[in-house]
Image: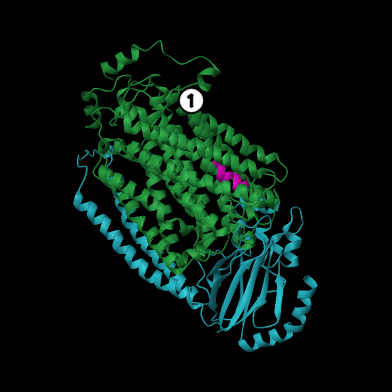
Chain colours: A cyan, B green
Amino acid sequence: MLRKSFLSLLGLHWAGAANADWALNMPRGITELSAETYDLHMMVFWWCVAIGVVVFGVMIISLFLHRKSRGAKAATFSHSTGAEVIWTIIPCIILLVMAVPAAETMIRLEDSRDPDVSIVITGYQWKWHYKYQDEDVEFYSSLALPSVKARFKESGVDPFSVENYLLEVDRPLVVPRGKKVRLLMTSNDVIHSWWVPDLAIKKDAIPGIINEVWFRATETGTFRGQCAELCGKDHGYMPIVVEVVEPDAYQAWVDTRQDGGAQVAQMEN
Amino acid sequence: MTTAVADAHDAHEHHGPEKGIKRWLFTTNHKDIGTMYLIFSLIMFFAGGSMALVIRSELMTPGLQFVHPEFFNQMTTMHALIMVFGAVMPAFVGLANWMIPMMIGAPDMALPRMNNWSFWILPVAFGLLASTLFMPGGAPASGWTMYPPLVLQTGDAFPFLIFSIHLMGLSSIMGAINIIVTILNMRAPDMWLLKMPMFVWTWLITAYLLIAVMPVFAGAVTMLLTDQFFGTSFFLAAGGGDPVMFQHIFWFFGHPEVYIMILPAFGVVSEIIPTFSRKPLFGHDSMVYAASCIAFLSFIVWAHHMFTVGMPLSGQLFFMFSTMLIAVPTGVKVFNWIATMWRGSMTFETPMLFSLGFVFLFTIGGFSGLMLAIAPADIQYHDSYFVVAHFHYVLVPGSIFALMAGAYYWLPKWTGHMYNETAGKLHFWMSTIFVNLTFFPMHFLGLAGMPRRIPDYSTQFADFNWMASVGAIGFGLSQLIFVYVLLTSKKGEKATDRVWEAPRGLEWTVPSPAPYHTFDTPPVKRVSEEAFE
């Protein structure tokens, strides 16, 4: 680790960090709504850039032209009702342009009717529990062993040598592609928050309350996330892994889990 | 300087400060109390800053190097509590104490004894809070937002946390009452409300916000206290309570609190930009209306901190729309500052540099704020480093830059000497470079999926975290330049009464350094006119 910091200071850091992918932006994700969310994000971002160019542009021009060292003489005007009305109305119009698509997406996000698969997610300090409502499948999902071995102070393991450090679990959540999956969230102790950026889902798991979200994955693959609500000392160590598979592979997985899953659940209870 | 002021001052020469420690313990003088507030907040700024450096050192590279996760959480919690309640808020109260009586031509604050008390409660409150670091179970580690049920897992520190917040609230409420009474009753005879300087105006509005929300906050933490010790279940689901209700109450306080920390900053910048543009503030009245609008809106947007808790759709839409509306009055403010500069005759002394830095960087924080208002996108941003980047942009190059600007602007009036301009400019440039190096990469981290309040992270976040940590250390060290400026502040050339070339306001009609008592008799109309022209 010391060597790593030293290399960083030498400016060799960028070459050294092989795992870095310099992610700059929100992922577009793998659901219709994650793509919509991404588009909203980009729309507002470009509006901000445009407003920024105009506002900062005027300011920078003023900073160059109207300086005493260039011999600028101060004008004396102190208000202009016309200008002020204009720069009140234009932002209102821009806000309206943003608000309409945002509200439309919001309405779709909340429509969790008629799901194909329902999964109850329960947050624990510090792991997740998944229970498939219509199947006899339930299990805990916690931080995978290689990360556990590396996470402690003076563990002697370089995090860079662990694949998916802190983002790997022992048993991932498996869901079918193309099906409407509804997640019902609650907690057994303190508030947690289930966040997977590629699904554009972040929902608090709150004791005594059941929250609902839904998604329909359009691609198969493995998608990772973390608990997003401070939940105690191991808040940083309860990752989420979602595996999206084809529906028949999903059915096969459910069939194998039905017995094994019960055993696992029993063992852990 | 006018003879009227000088005479009033000479007549009271015998009425100077007490000697030794008694001067500070028993003082009722607004200048002494202002000084104590400012020094206290500077100490807290460095205390909270050291905690930030513990956080950033740990996060410099993946893996745990220096601290354990539980201590890391104590650091994030204490850093926030100290910076919000110990550094930023008392610093603005300090500026208010020093400057408001001098700006409105009053001899002192209206309630000088209460003024003494509202300051001296603060060291006690923060002594209590800091002592929790040495208690079994450590300091509070639930984040400054103190969400139950997590906060109820705090160790012995818990009642001390609650009580120290009660004390801070008491201090803030008394300070706010004092400011309101002073402004409404003690203005110079011909200073009607809309003639008041912007700093006075923004503080008047801020003081009302404080009175409105600090009791709410005190109530919320008291309910936590009774849940913990007296068997109630306000926030405990098992007893029929609702953990989310705490969040509603907390943010009903918390969002106005955000504006409590930024409105006085608007005021400071609105004083400084006209001075160094040599041009009156553009749209003074619309600035007042904009600040009032922001204050009103701050009461109806709180649940935008809670888009992921599972609110009804109608609630989410309402809070999204009301939050977006804040962009309008805030935009008016920024446009008015730029219009003030436009066709002015600008020079770039340190206060002006910090104010310009404020306008640029606060606006960037405003942009990310607008993005956060869009509820579906907020679901992705929420509790990620994007949020951390956002609120640090509005608080550090926002509130703290404005505080620095104000300190440099009024320092010659306080000490009677010009500060070291070269050091001041260096302080500005170093702060600006490092503040951006620290907080800009955090936007990327958040968008890429890094949650906030975690002591360790996946290796894909390593590079930007390393940058942010380097920036944080640089920013911390840069603040030592400010200490150097303060320590040498009496060595510079003597300041004139007006200090700057074209300042406006009554504070520039009294001598530099400002005598212990100013405006024993209200300024005569002629003086005020000169100052207001």
Q: Residue at x 37, y 32 (%)?
A: B181
Q: Residue at x 54, y 16 (%)?
A: B20
- Locate residue B240: give its quadrant: bottom right
Disc 1: which residue: B488
- Quadrant showing the C terminus of chain B: top left
B494 vs B518, nearest the viewer: B518
Inspect the magenta stretch and tell me whether residue A128 lies in it.
Answer: no
- Locate residue A224: give its quadrant: bottom right
Tell me if I can see residue B282 in this picture: no
Instruction: Please provide the residue range marked out in magenta.
Output: B75-82
* Callout 1 amino acid: Thr
The x, y position of residue B37, in whole percent, is: 49, 31
Label 1 SS:
loop
- Locate residue B43: give its quadrant: top right
Q: Residue at x 41, y 32 (%)?
A: B178
The x, y position of residue B175, in whole percent, is: 45, 34
Q: Give the left or right position of residue B469, taking residue B492 as reference.
A: right
